């Protein structure tokens, strides 16, 4: 039997903790958040209840569309906190009217033409892992039918240019399949977002996803050579150059468009040889700010580590990395070309110069970064989305948000964020936990990523979450941080994105939307 994804929670159904594991989790949360009294809640039924579709499947789509209840339910929403909450309650009232799975670009064109003629909304759907409301069928509905356009069949390696290290890949290719198909050629994309197992190349491109590298090519933009977008008005295929100075870059308009302009169907991606050498170490600091100063020195050194994750004491404790109230900086280098002794040695010298104590490594071997503190962090990082679903099932509100700011801004921004979110947690949950880590670091600033946890009020979870999310977002805006570094805008970040972007750019973006999607059928409410 094929392994099934959970209908409502993150990831595989068989990885959701059983009642015994949930009781153990409740005890752990009780120790971390004394104001919480977590208890097991009933889980939803396996068979979803969805309303009857508003429309029939058109003849032109009959060969590759379905109105099966389970398929419609799985395409109702993503995996944001409010999506998990609705799913836990068994709410699929907003299910799309049909799910189309085009098998080639011709069938994508057919879907858009049919929906454009009928005034039906189209939601491009990759892995369904959006945490910002990017595939929310309820929010996208404008009065008529809603079609979820699942790109899963547009997958695989279509062409490889090994000389130029370029691979043409279908947008529906899931992360593990993408790496598996490149592996026999000794190549890799090395883009590993937290959602890697369940998200697709097209989704990464549409949301400007952040990935594996903590420095250098941090976003999917940096890996994209060219791509194809199918719009209601026609096809936009960007030119294949390594670089160009010929005006504004068309690909930059498509990457991050979140399905509002059209459907990304394939892309030429820059791939690299698989690493042969790895080196890593872990360094502790007495304070998070001391660790931040060391991270800045590392980011500005030109050493370009693949990993430079800084965890504050609460983040280290939450992810079972350290329990001694120190901040920890996880440093890692990788190369397909040369050993890394000198690079790691210089990075550790910088860390010691800023008060760091080496507690693990230096290690240079194939599994460097997969053992010790770094290995513990890596596993906890992959398990974190599962943890959020499990926490909700025992009555705990938890979520994450991220930003980017300059090094000069960071101390004041961090203090404002912690103060604002802590106050919201006290008001809404009677207290709670706020932790922080750096996911990426740049010469001019870090990308801080925050986690909050608090006790839920039965029936009041949505109001609690909205209040805490608003407090965090307002504090980010006031302190000069971006509303999102790599989680995309979607619908949840729209109010703050509208304020962040220049008004004239908003007008220009709206004009592009009107040109490519004149009837406004593509994912309404996202970006605009």
Image: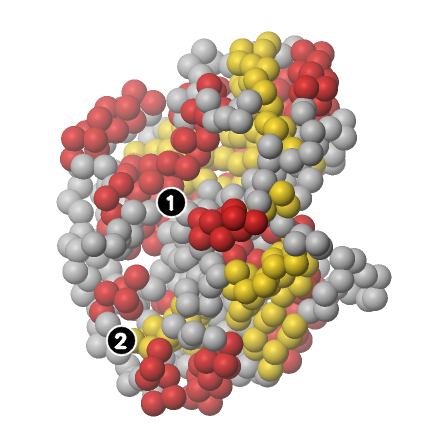
Most extreme residue toward the right is: 245
Quarter of the image with the N terminus is bottom left
Element carrying mark 2: loop
Q: Is residue 42 above or below residue 51?
A: above
Residue 465: mark: 1
User: Few, some or many C-alpha atoms within 10 Å of disc 2 (few <14, some 14-19, many ≥20)?
Assistant: some
| Label 1 – label 2 distance at C-alpha | 33 Å
Residue 403 visible somewhere in the drawing: no
User: Few, some or many C-alpha atoms within 10 Å of disc 1 (few <14, some 14-19, many ≥20)?
Assistant: many
Quarter of the image with the C terminus is bottom right
Disc 1, disc 2: CB below 8 Å? no
Q: Is residue 496 above or below residue 40?
A: below
Percent coordinates x, y for residue 169 in the rendering? 55, 61
Give the quadrant of residue 211. Answer: top right
Percent coordinates x, y for residue 235 in the rendering? 61, 78
The residue under the point 67% across, 11% down is 352
The residue under the point 55% across, 72% down is 262
Percent coordinates x, y for residue 509 in the rendering? 66, 69
Residue 67: mark: 2
> Image check: 138 left or right of 134?
left
The residue under the point 48% across, 61% down is 156
Percent coordinates x, y for residue 374 in the rendering? 49, 24
Residue 483: mark: none
Element carrying mark 1: helix
Q: Is residue 307 above or below residue 85?
A: above
Residue 292 visible somewhere in the drawing: yes
């Amino acid at each position: 039997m094929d392994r099934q994804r959970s209908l409502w929670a993150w990831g595989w159904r068989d990885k959701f903790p059983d009642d015994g594991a949930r009781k153990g989790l409740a005890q752990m949360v009780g120790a971390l958040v004394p104001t919480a009294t977590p208890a097991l809640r009933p889980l939803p039924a396996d068979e979803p209840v969805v309303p009857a579709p508003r429309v029939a499947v058109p003849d032109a789509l009959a060969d590759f569309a379905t109105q099966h209840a389970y398929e419609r339910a799985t395409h109702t929403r993503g995996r944001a906190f409010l999506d998990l909450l609705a799913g836990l309650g068994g709410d699929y009232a907003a299910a799309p009217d049909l799910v189309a799975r085009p098998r080639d670009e011709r069938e994508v064109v057919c879907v858009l033409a049919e929906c454009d003629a009928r005034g039906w909304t189209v939601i491009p759907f990759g892995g369904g892992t959006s945490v910002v409301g990017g595939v929310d069928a309820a929010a996208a509905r404008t009065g008529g039918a809603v079609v979820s356009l699942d790109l899963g069949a547009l997958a695989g390696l279509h062409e490889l240019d090994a000389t130029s290290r370029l691979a043409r890949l279908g947008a529906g290719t899931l992360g593990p399949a993408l790496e598996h198909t490149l592996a026999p050629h000794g190549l890799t994309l090395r883009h590993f977002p937290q959602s890697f197992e369940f998200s697709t190349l097209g989704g990464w491109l549409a949301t400007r996803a952040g990935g594996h590298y903590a420095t250098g090519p941090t976003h999917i933009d940096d890996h994209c050579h060219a791509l194809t977008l199918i719009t209601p008005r026609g096809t936009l295929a960007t030119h294949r150059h390594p670089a160009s100075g010929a005006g504004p870059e068309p690909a930059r308009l498509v990457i991050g468009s979140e399905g509002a302009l059209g459907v990304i169907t394939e892309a030429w991606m820059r791939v690299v040889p698989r690493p042969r050498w790895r080196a890593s170490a872990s360094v502790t600091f007495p304070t998070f700010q001391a660790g931040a100063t060391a991270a800045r020195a590392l980011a500005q050194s030109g050493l370009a580590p693949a990993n430079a994750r800084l965890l504050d004491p609460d983040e280290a404790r939450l992810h079972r990395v350290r329990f001694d109230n120190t901040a920890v900086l996880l440093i890692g280098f990788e190369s397909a070309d040369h050993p890394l002794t000198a690079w790691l040695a210089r990075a550790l010298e910088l860390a010691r110069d800023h008060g760091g104590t080496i507690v693990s490594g230096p290690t240079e071997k194939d599994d460097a970064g997969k053992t010790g503190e770094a290995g513990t962090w890596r596993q906890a990082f992959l398990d974190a989305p599962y943890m959020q679903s499990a926490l909700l099932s025992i009555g705990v509100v938890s979520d994450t948000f991220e930003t980017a700011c300059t090094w000069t801004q960071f101390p004041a921004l961090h203090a404002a964020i912690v103060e604002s979110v802590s106050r919201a947690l006290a008001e809404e949950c009677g207290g709670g936990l706020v932790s922080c880590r750096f996911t990426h670091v740049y010469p001019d600033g870090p990308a801080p990523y925050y986690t909050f946890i608090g006790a839920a009020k039965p029936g009041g979870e949505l109001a609690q979450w909205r209040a805490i999310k608003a407090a965090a977002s307002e504090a980010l805006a006031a302190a000069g941080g971006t509303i999102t570094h790599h989680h995309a805008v979607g619908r949840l970040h729209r109010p703050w994105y509208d304020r962040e972007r220049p008004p004239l750019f908003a007008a220009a973006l709206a004009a592009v939307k009107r040109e490519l999607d004149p009837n406004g059928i593509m994912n309404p409410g996202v970006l605009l």
